[in-house]
Image (cartoon, rainbow, N blue to C red):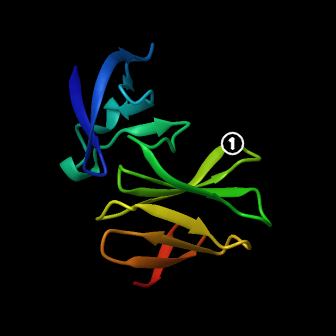
C-alpha cells in the first residue's frame, strides 16, 4: 500500500496502472476513489503543482457526520469527518462543490432556498453563503 494526500488528509493507494500511452498514472484508493496523475507534467512542474485528479469525485474520506436537503433546488449538503462540506446535485448525481476546512464540522444544515449553509463545530457555528465554486464564510 502506498500513500498520498488530498487536502492534507492521507489516502491509501491500493492499485496502480499506466494508460496505454504511458502518459497518465491511474490509481485506486482504499476510499473507493479513482485518481489520475499526468506523468507528462512531472518534469516541468513545481512540486506544489503536482496533484492527483479524482474521477467522479466528491466522496467523503471517512464518516459523514451531517446531511441536509434543500427544499427548492435539487441540492443536498453533507459534512464529513474528513473536514469537508460538500454540496451535491441529486438530479445530476454530482458533487458540485467541496469546501476544505481547518476544523472538523459536527453538523450541517442548508437554507430552504439553497443559498446559505450553517455548520456546527466544537467551539462555534459558521454561516456560509453558497457561491458558484466556493462557500464564503460570512460569520462565526
Q: Please provide percent x and percent y for residue 38.
A: 37, 33
Q: Is residue 41 left or right of residue 92?
A: left
Residue 27 at least partly seen:
yes
Q: Nearer the viewer, residue 85 or 124?
A: 124
Q: Residue at x 28, y 50 (%)?
A: 49
Q: Please provide percent x and percent y for residue 30.
A: 35, 25
In the picture, residue 33 is in which quadrant? top left
In the picture, residue 22 is in which quadrant? top left
Q: Nearer the viewer, residue 119 or 134?
A: 119
Q: Nearer the viewer, residue 89 or 126?
A: 126
Q: Is residue 33 left or right of residue 115?
A: left
Q: Residue at x 76, y 56 (%)?
A: 74
Q: Residue at x 58, y 67 (%)?
A: 109
In the rendered image, the vertical position of residue 57 relative to residue 97, given as above or below? above
Q: Residue furthest right?
A: 72
- Residue behind mark 1: 93
Q: Please provide percent x and percent y for residue 3.
A: 22, 30
Residue 26 at least partly seen:
no
Q: Is residue 105 left or right of residue 112?
A: left
In the rendered image, the vertical position of residue 2 relative to residue 7, given as above or below? above
Q: Is residue 53 left or right of residue 57?
A: left
Q: Please provide percent x and percent y for residue 116.
A: 61, 75
Q: Secondary structure at mark 1?
A: loop
Rendered-image quadrant of the N terminus: top left
Q: Residue at x 32, y 43 (%)?
A: 51
Amino acid at each position: 500500500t502506498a500513500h498520498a494526500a488530498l487536502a492534507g488528509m492521507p489516502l491509501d493507494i491500493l492499485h496502480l496502472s499506466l494508460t496505454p500511452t504511458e502518459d497518465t498514472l491511474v490509481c485506486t484508493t482504499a476510499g473507493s476513489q479513482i485518481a489520475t496523475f499526468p506523468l507528462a507534467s512531472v518534469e516541468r512542474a513545481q512540486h506544489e503543482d503536482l496533484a492527483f485528479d479524482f474521477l467522479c469525485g466528491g466522496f467523503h474520506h471517512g464518516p459523514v457526520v451531517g446531511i441536509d436537503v434543500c427544499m427548492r433546488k435539487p441540492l443536498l449538503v453533507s459534512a464529513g469527518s474528513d473536514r469537508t462540506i460538500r454540496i451535491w446535485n441529486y438530479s445530476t448525481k454530482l458533487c458540485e462543490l467541496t469546501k476544505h476546512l481547518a476544523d472538523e464540522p459536527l453538523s450541517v444544515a442548508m437554507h430552504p432556498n439553497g443559498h446559505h449553509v450553517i455548520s456546527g463545530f466544537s467551539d462555534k457555528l459558521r454561516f456560509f453563503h453558497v457561491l458558484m465554486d466556493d462557500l464564503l464564510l460570512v460569520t462565526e
